[in-house]
Amino acid sequence: MPDTQTDIQAVRTTILSWLQSRLDEEAMEWIKSTSDKLIDGAEDWVFYSSFSAVPRHTGKENLSLSTKEKAKAKELRTGWSPSHWSIDDLGRTLLTLSIAEEQKDVFFEKLEKTFISSDIGEGIALYQSLPLLPHPNDLTDRAAEGLRTNITSIFNAVAHRNPYPADYLDDDAWNQMVLKALFVETPLYPIQNIDSRANKKLAEMLVDYAHERWAADRDVSPELWRSVGPFADEKIVKNDLKKVLQNSSKLHQQAALLALSDSPVESAKQLVVQHSSKLDQMRQNNIDWDYIGKQFEQDSL
């Protein structure tokens, strides 16, 4: 992947315009003047102190982007989807981007110090901004650190609605992220490009995880089978997907049918034919993997 995917100046300009429409004059003056100082090479303490102080000036309201603003985000960075961000997330990202054009080692030293000292809110803002930062190839260890945490909101800041993992994590790190999401019971559907990054090793890991859960008499998320389907061989179809198809939950049955539809083996195709009317009904009702994930998440609350 390229060592940068954003025009940092263009992203800063856009963020300022979004903040302009949401902040009062005093708060806007503070964040713009602080950003300008950082771009002009202000001392390190200015960045550290202002990064922490952002919410006191901006508040923490949800960003609530318009349709036009969402389109602009994707135009600036493929996959960038900050709709769920708060205003202070956006302000902190602006300040981080205001030091992003410093010399690489200087920028990384400041960034790492900020990550290490960050509280949860600051950490969420930093991890969400990963796809916008320069030198993204050098941020994989930092992303992995975020994925290792037991704090679900930090894990989700990396894994959910964030294009960075799909673009830069290798298969081993990607597989661990998907498995960890199931382990901490956070949904899979917000993970960008989850279907295109599916792989045989991940499918095997997920099947093993399902067997462990079943052996402990625990439920398995129907989303687990999303990355298994394309690699479901005769054994997985016979031992696992047929079992899921017989689950008393309609949602699990639907997940099994979608997984079977993705499997290349003959036994899966035969089961799909046997349940073709159910599958047609699912298609008519727009029941896909995202629907199953959202419904399972809602039912689990």
Image (cartoon, rainbow, N blue to C red):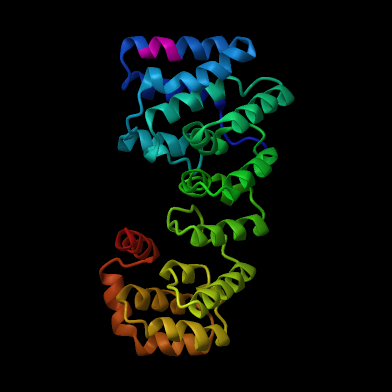
- Residue 1: tell me if it is visible: no
Q: Which residues are magenta?
A: 27-31
**Occupied quadrant, residue 247:** bottom left
Q: How many marks?
A: 0
Q: Nearer the viewer, residue 237 or 187?
A: 187
**Residue under the point 67% across and 54% down:** 170
**Image x and y of residue 173, in percent:** 64, 55
Residue at point 65% right, 24% down?
110
Question: Looking at the image, can residue 106 be seen?
Answer: yes
Name the foreground residue: 137 vs 181: 181
**Residue 220 position (above or below residue 54):** below
Q: Position of residue 89 (x, y in %)?
A: 44, 30
- In the displayed orientation, state which residue is furthest to the front: 216
Q: Horizontal placement of 108 versus 294: left or right?
A: right
Q: Is residue 119 above or below residue 200?
A: above
Asked whether 80 falls inside the magenta stretch, the response is no
Q: Is residue 205 above or below residue 65?
A: below
In the image: residue 284, left or right of residue 72? left
* Dominant secondary structure (helix, strand or loop) of the stretch shown in magenta: helix
Give the quarter of the image for residue 279.
Answer: bottom left
> Measured from the top left, where is residue 63 in percent x and y?
34, 32
Write down the quadrant of residue 112 in the picture: top right
Q: Residue at x 30, y 35 (%)?
A: 66
The image quadrant where one finds the N terminus is: top right
Quadrant for the C terminus in the image: bottom left
Q: Nearer the viewer, residue 50 or 69?
A: 50
Give how far across and how far down residue 132 sits, in percent: 55, 34
For residue 246, above or below residue 22: below
Question: Which residue is located at x 30 percent, y 76 percent?
Answer: 250
